[in-house]
Amino acid sequence: MRLPKPWPRFLWRRVKRLTPTSLFGRSLLIIVLPVALMQIVVTWIFFDAHWQTVNSHLAEGLAGDVAYVLQSYEEDPSPANFAKIVRRAQENLDLSIQFEPEAILPHGKRPSLFITVDRSLQRALAERVDEPFWFDTGRYPAYVDVRVKVPGGVLRMIAPKDRVFATRGQIFVLWLTVATVLLTGVSILFIRNQVRAIERLAAAADAFGRGVDVAFRPHGAREVRLAARAFLSMKARIQRHVEQRTVLLASVSHDLRTPLTRLKLQLALAGKNARTEAMKTDVAEMEHMIDEYLAFARGEGQEGVESVCLAELIRSVGDDAARAGAEVNLNADPDLRVLARPGAIRRALSNLIMNAAMHGAQVEVTARPLPNGGVEILVEDDGPGIPPERFEEAFTPFSRLDEARNLNNAKGVGLGLAIARDVARGHGGDIFLGRSPLGGLCATMRLP
């Protein structure tokens, strides 16, 4: 039986799922959310404690004027007195009054944007006026229409809307909105500038990891510049290490090849017999092993990156494998290109294809684009394959999946897949092993 999760932890996980994942989104949320909450709280307090109170007082004032006019008219409904009431209301109360004989009160009301104004006026008129009344605050943009039922008709009064509505509240809300928008815009500009520095640092690190040397200058906040300078120092140390290793490998290559060349020359001058032929085989095997060791250690790190046509590269490697006796079927888009180091990619594909040709009679190579913009190269064979639990072991350097490590069982030293994966990961991709529909192994190389 599964126990329920603690409520605070469960709630925190739900909140984390709803928050942005990018630094830009989180920084913007940290700055904008408190400002927005503050503005909402201030606006709420303003409307609740001030604006509604002011509107209620204004509505009570208009209701009192309406009650005064109504009482004056009911005391003397003569035309002369009505004309006097109309004149005084216009001069002193800013009301326009009209008597509509035999009229009735309307039934419906137009919806108003500010319901609190209608509620305040409804409450104030109900307290001051005993006769049936009707009002409308939405029909005219700048006026309020109030009608009261009197004997013989309807007394209609038109008052300016600012008699019941505090327009300064709208201005206050407008200023709050404008200030929020301006603060948010400034925050976006500053946050975007800081995030851009981090994005450039990440792009430079990714390009350096793929062997592309890009110009990069530290900028941004102090912490970002500190991280950028640390990256440049690390980059310089790695490049210095690679250069030193390349020089060392060149010396080792020269020192090792010199005695091998002398041995080959002496064997060539010696007579042909079973012993010399066996020695020639051992020397050739030793030379092949040295080449594999040096290629694995060198890693093709000094080669430049350029746009490579995969179809031509795969066709060239396939032709080499075909000359070695393998049957290779190619299926690649002729327009498929990728930014890579040609020599390194060629060596990785050669290792994959020759490895497939070594263990199978039929080899199929397919290159196709990926939905995310990368490319995928599949090398399949109809050989015995590798058990799934030993896929990762196949990439281990010097591993030939042969516990006895008998050099007579298979050619090579177990560096082909390790070199291929090292090249793929050096380009920002990877190599995966799986089962092939042909019955053997399927090696999938993915490149960005």
Image (tube, grey):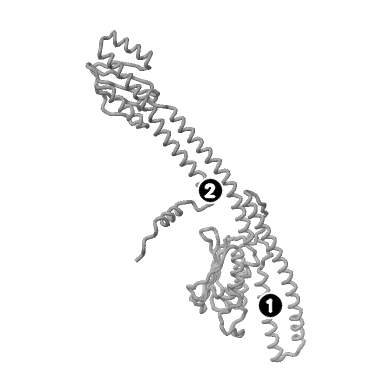
**Toward which corner of the image does residue 335 lie, by quadrant?**
bottom right
Name which residue lies at 74% across and 81% down.
260
**CA–CA distance between discs 1 and 2?**
54 Å
Examine the rendered structure and indicate whether residue 355 appears above or below residue 2.
below
In this rendering, is residue 366 above or below 371? below
Q: Is residue 389 left or right of residue 417?
A: left
**Residue 285 appearing in the image:** yes
- Report x, y in % for residue 344: 64, 67
Query: First in sequence: mark 1 or mark 2?
Result: 2
- Horizontal placement of 119 versus 314: left or right? left
Specify whether residue 331 is in view: no
Q: Is 101 placed above or below 179 here?
A: above
Q: Are marks 1 and 2 in contact (CB under 8 Å)?
A: no
**Residue highlighted by disc 2:** 27
Badge 1: few (under 14), some or many (20 or more) residues near its Cα, within 10 Å? Answer: some
Residue 179 picture location, percent across and down: 51, 36
Left or right: residue 141 compared with residue 188: left
The percent coordinates of residue 342 (x first, y second) are 64, 65
| Position of residue 371 measured from the top left corner of the image (x, y, whole percent) | 51, 59
Residue type at mark 2: give it: Ser
| Amino acid, disc 1 | Ile
Tag 2's secondary structure?
Answer: helix
Q: Please tell me in which quadrant of the rendered image residue 230 appears.
A: bottom right
Q: Which residue is mark 1?
A: 290
- Give the residue at the far top of this rendering: 80
Q: Residue at x 26, y 9 (%)?
A: 78
